[in-house]
Image (cartoon, rainbow, N blue to C red):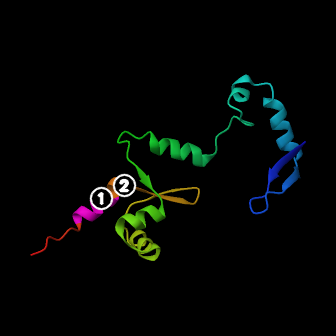
Amino acid sequence: MWIRKSREKTNNICNIPLLNIPKIILEKYKNNKDYQAKEQLLPVPTNLELGMEALSSSASQDRYLNNNQACEMLHISQRTLQDYKDKGRISFYKLEGKILYKYSDIENLLNNNYKAWE
């Protein structure tokens, strides 16, 4: 068995040999109609998918932002955002190396630090 995948830069097709353990797993699920209908090779979602699903189904239905979106909303650099995280000024979630921020947390940070012009 082979995995056929096109390279991102050149779009050339690569043939990657499948190792024995993945072959056994694929063989186990090859006749499963649920996964054939979904066009999935394996029935197991990744940890990142599970984490994102848990976040998106939270009671508040809050929106989550990545680093770039948080920086854009706060009008700060990536380094300043890192400094805010290090000093505990902003809360964040870390899922498999991906950092996410609650939109409402950033809104609260802005509102709590608002100084009216006198």
The residue wearing badge 2 is: 103
- 88 with respect to 9 (left or right): left
Other-residue count near label 1 (Cα within 10 Å), few / some / many at <14 / 14–19 / ≥20: few
Return the mark for residue 54: none
The residue wearing badge 1 is: 107
The quarter of the picture where residue 105 lies is bottom left
Considering depth in this image, is 53 or 118 the residue closer to the camera? 118
- 51 with respect to 104 (left or right): right
- Residue 46 vs 68, above or below: the answer is above
Residue in the image at 67% along x and 30% along y: 38
Q: Magenta stretch containing residue 111, yes or no?
A: yes
Q: In the rendered view of the protein, which quadrant contains the N terminus?
A: top right
- Residue 90 vs 29, above or below: the answer is below
Contact? badges 1 and 2 (CB < 8 Å) = yes
Q: Magenta stretch containing residue 24, yes or no?
A: no
Residue in the image at 45% along x and 43% along y: 56
- Residue 69 vs 46, above or below: the answer is below
